[in-house]
Amino acid sequence: MKRKKNEGRKVHGQNGQLPTLTNQLLRNEGTNSNPQGRSGPDKKIRSKSMNKTKHTTRRDAKYRLMVGTLNCRTLNGEEKVVELEEELKDIKWDIIGLCETKRKGETSTILKSGNLLYNYGPPTTSTKGIGFIVNQKIKESIREIKPYNERIIEITIRINERYNLRILQVYAPTSTSEEEEIENFYEDLEKAINSKKEKFTIIMGDFNAKIGKNINNSSLIGNFGLGNRNLRGDLLEEFLGKQQLYVMNTFFKKKEKKKWTWRAPNGTTKNEIDYILTDKKHIIQDVSTISKFKFFSDHRLVRATVKIDTKWERTKLCSKKKTLIKTEILNTKCKEFKIEIENRFNLLEDTNDNLELQNKEITDIIITAAKKVTSDTTNRKEGKLTDETKRLFKRRRELLQDRNAKSNIEYIEHCKVLRKNIRTDIRNYNTNAIEKTIKNNNSMKILRRNLSSGREQIIGIKKKDGNGKYGM
């Protein structure tokens, strides 16, 4: 008969403290063994094979980002922000540039999710507007966000101590605008690009122009454009030549149904008018439209995979942090810890006599149990949307799989119900929070903070005369 490993073995503590073996394992968790006696990672490696390994690791140091652009048509209202974040949960992304937000003024908000939402629009009217939403994982890497006007904005991301990535989000005038307005837009964009230099630059957004096929055999345009070029496309090509920018959408072969970025109100006319441009073609690994992203807009999200080989410094800006074991919490949960370990030992059978393997299994059990017991779930905040509303999001994605969904009455009615449910859920959430605060006589300051979309940030300090801001 097989003997269970936990027979005759118990984990005890003294005076409510953790056993010495457990504390030793937890202290050693996350550190590397050093049987060769090396003094540290900076010590030179003598072996030729080890030198080769080190060179490979250095060469493979990559900086990877998922960057996208979206004309959201409007982001004015809390329900639209909630809807945007709900759709972003299902895709990989780091930075999304936003066009036509229709939000007033300049605002910078840390949302409840931890993501950063930055907007710049006209101070008095809900028109135009441009901005970024930045994933919480990389928001600490932001060097600068600088708006030029309601159609051009830039964000600078730190790659390492030597290099930065500069991203400009643009929203060009529509086809009904005057020629003078179009010319002014490209002049402003040219000034913005030339205002400073970085090693890597990306320009993306809604250009309201059709590049189409590469009819002039330009090296800046690939062979996989969609449709035919229009007059605005000629203006864009001229601009590309001046700035030596590549239209990366056209360099990746995709099916036609995965190329279009905008659909006309009739539901049948589809064009490619949202582009991602760059001055370094090799840093873009892929550009594609994201079909599973179903935000209520006639534009589709265009996403690029950016991969930069730094070669000088391995970066971990987007890597997940290791789960740390909080021994203070563990000391207060000795009973739960003991039960968790006993349950895991009960599943362990004595199938071999290898002492090293047994030691590894026991170590893994103790560390895994400690992480589970000390995992902090108290900071998880309840969302404002109910499960019923989330199911409506899922249903809307299913309806949009149909090519003629825009003209489908069921789809239109479903969207109305969804928007109504979002408003109702937010209203109910706020009402319940107010009632709970009054009943428990809690802080109104904390209530206002909980009901807000996020934490507002200071954009700048006005000068003494009230004109302009310092640093701008």
Image (spheres, helix red, strand yellow):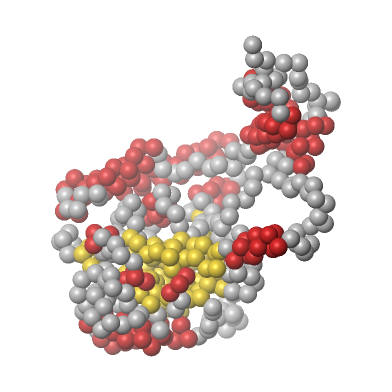
> Is 115 situated above or below 325?
below
Question: Residue extending furthest top?
Answer: 1
Is 104 displayed left or right of 373 in the figure?
left
The image quadrant that residue 369 belongs to is top right
Residue 181: in sight, yes or no?
no
Residue 404: in sight, yes or no?
yes
Q: Quadrant of the image for the C terminus? A: bottom right
Q: Quadrant of the image for the N terminus? A: top right
The residue that appears at 55% across and 64% down in the rendered structure is: 63
The residue that appears at 32% across and 74% down in the rendered structure is: 222
From the top left corner, tell me how far across and down residue 56 is, in percent: 61, 63
The image quadrant that residue 243 belongs to is bottom left
The residue that appears at 80% across and 32% down in the rendered structure is: 21
> Is 343 situated above or below 461?
above
Is 61 displayed left or right of 97 in the figure?
right
Is 152 displayed left or right of 55 in the figure?
left
From the top left corner, tell me how far across and down residue 219 is, in percent: 34, 81
All told, the count of numbered labels is 0
From the top left corner, tell me how far across and down residue 17 is, in percent: 81, 30
The residue that appears at 51% across and 51% down in the rendered structure is: 113
From the top left corner, tell me how far across and down residue 6 is, in percent: 70, 19
> Is 299 situated above or below 187?
above
